[in-house]
């Protein structure tokens, strides 16, 4: 009997070693993928930086690009994301991701608001901590970890966040005292979310040529957003960006505190048991939360006259530091969940 127990113990230890090895390999691969992806983003930022430094454009010219991103490119991304086949199983999966996304957005909004009051955060800092860059990084990471067919669920989080951005986000960054619900409802981004959902549930597929056009325009979201950031940074002192303690503090809240709160919420919510693939589906939501600050914050600051240069500095710093924090947060998720 002792030999049997010894064999079981050895097998158990071997399995544990294999699992630990697999985790380390996944973390390493995610780190390498992130480095490559973020290197691409920084090259795009450099392009924007160069066109301003070369005198071809001014930093303020990026406002036009920001408007194109906000009112044209993002709506194309959203509508195109929902152009998938309707199945009852997919609806259940989408519903779980939707509930998790709304839960996190609501609770995090309250948490960030409370922290903002205590630490006297300004509008740009509050928005940068709360809103994640779920568009530029989530697609390649989800594709790598789970497969291309899982990307749709990341777009559900994007759509939920988009609603908050064009209500809460617009309200604080534009410093408007009162929300104009008519403007919010008639905003092209809100209309695109509604249109995408309707097309999905009515099983309507757009003509191939239109779908390809939406996809092509939507793929510009990363390059256009990063070029705007580079153009704005070109008129700033790089020394001031990297020696600004406040930027590091905001980055800490965005990349460490917000993800930890999110993980605790997902764990205690029990949503993981709501579907056989619950762990994978919630991982996608978690990945969307742990990304750097949203580049949309920078674009909104430009359009509504807030401090877009400070928003760009936070965006650059969180993007750079996410190379370290995102793999660690994925490891933490796998350990806790």
Image (cartoon, helix red, strand yellow):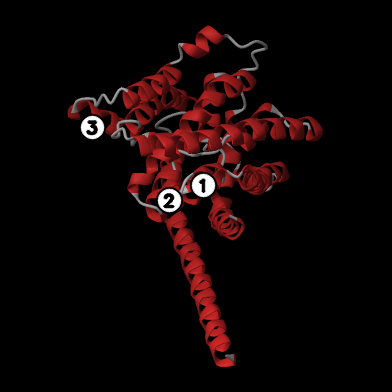
Q: Crowding at label 1, few (<14), some or many (≥20) Cα neighbours within 10 Å?
A: many
Q: Secondary structure at mark 2?
A: helix
- Give the distance between the C-alpha atoms of the residues marked 2 and 1, in whole angstroms: 8 Å
- C-beta proximity under 8 Å, tags 2 and 1: yes
Q: Crowding at label 2, few (<14), some or many (≥20) Cα neighbours within 10 Å?
A: many
| Residue 7 rendering spot, x and y as whole percentages | 52, 87
| Residue 291 rendering spot, x and y as whole percentages | 54, 45
Lower position in the chain sequence, tag 3 or tag 2 = 2
Lower position in the chain sequence, tag 1 or tag 3 = 3
The residue that label 1 is drawn on is 287
- C-beta proximity under 8 Å, tags 3 and 2: no
Counting every numbered tag in the picture gives 3
94 lies left or right of 8: left
Q: Which mark is residue 212?
A: 3
259 lies left or right of 69: right
Please report the residue visible at 45 percent of the width from the left and 11 percent of the height from the top.
Answer: 186
Is residue 271 visible in the rendered image? The answer is: yes
Q: Quadrant of residue 210?
A: top left
Please report the residue visible at 55 percent of the width from the left and 25 percent of the height from the top.
Answer: 165
Q: Which mark is residue 141?
A: 2
Lower position in the chain sequence, tag 2 or tag 1 = 2
């Amino acid at each position: 009997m002792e030999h049997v127990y010894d064999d079981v113990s050895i097998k158990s230890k071997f399995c544990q070693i294999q699992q630990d090895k697999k985790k380390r390999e996944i973390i390493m691969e995610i780190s390498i993928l992130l480095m490559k992806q973020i290197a691409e983003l920084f090259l795009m930022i450099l392009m924007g930086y160069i066109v301003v430094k070369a005198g071809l454009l001014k930093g303020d010219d990026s406002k036009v690009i920001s408007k194109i991103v906000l009112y044209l490119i993002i709506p194309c991304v959203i509508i195109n994301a929902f152009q998938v086949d309707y199945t009852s199983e997919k609806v259940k999966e989408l519903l779980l991701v939707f509930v998790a996304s709304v839960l996190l957005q609501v609770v995090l909004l309250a948490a960030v608001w409370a922290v903002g009051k205590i630490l006297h955060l300004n509008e740009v800092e509050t928005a940068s901590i709360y809103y994640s860059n779920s568009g530029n990084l989530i697609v390649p990471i989800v594709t790598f970890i789970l497969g291309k067919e899982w990307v749709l669920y990341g777009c559900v989080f994007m759509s939920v966040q988009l609603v908050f951005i064009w209500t809460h986000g617009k309200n604080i960054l534009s410093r408007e005292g009162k929300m104009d619900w008519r403007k919010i409802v008639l905003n092209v981004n809100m209309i695109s979310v509604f249109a995408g959902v309707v097309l999905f549930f009515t099983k309507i597929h757009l003509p191939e040529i239109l779908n390809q056009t939406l996809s092509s325009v939507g793929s510009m979201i990363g390059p256009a957003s990063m070029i705007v950031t580079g153009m704005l940074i070109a008129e700033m002192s790089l020394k001031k960006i990297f020696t600004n303690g406040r930027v590091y503090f905001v980055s800490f809240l965005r990349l460490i505190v917000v993800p930890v709160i999110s993980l605790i919420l997902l764990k205690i919510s029990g949503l993981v048991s709501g579907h056989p693939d619950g762990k994978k589906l919630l991982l996608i939501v978690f990945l969307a939360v742990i990304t750097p600050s949203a580049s949309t914050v920078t674009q909104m600051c430009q359009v509504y006259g807030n401090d877009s240069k400070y928003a760009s500095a936070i965006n650059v710093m969180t993007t750079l530091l996410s190379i370290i924090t995102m793999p660690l947060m994925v490891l933490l998720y796998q350990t806790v969940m």
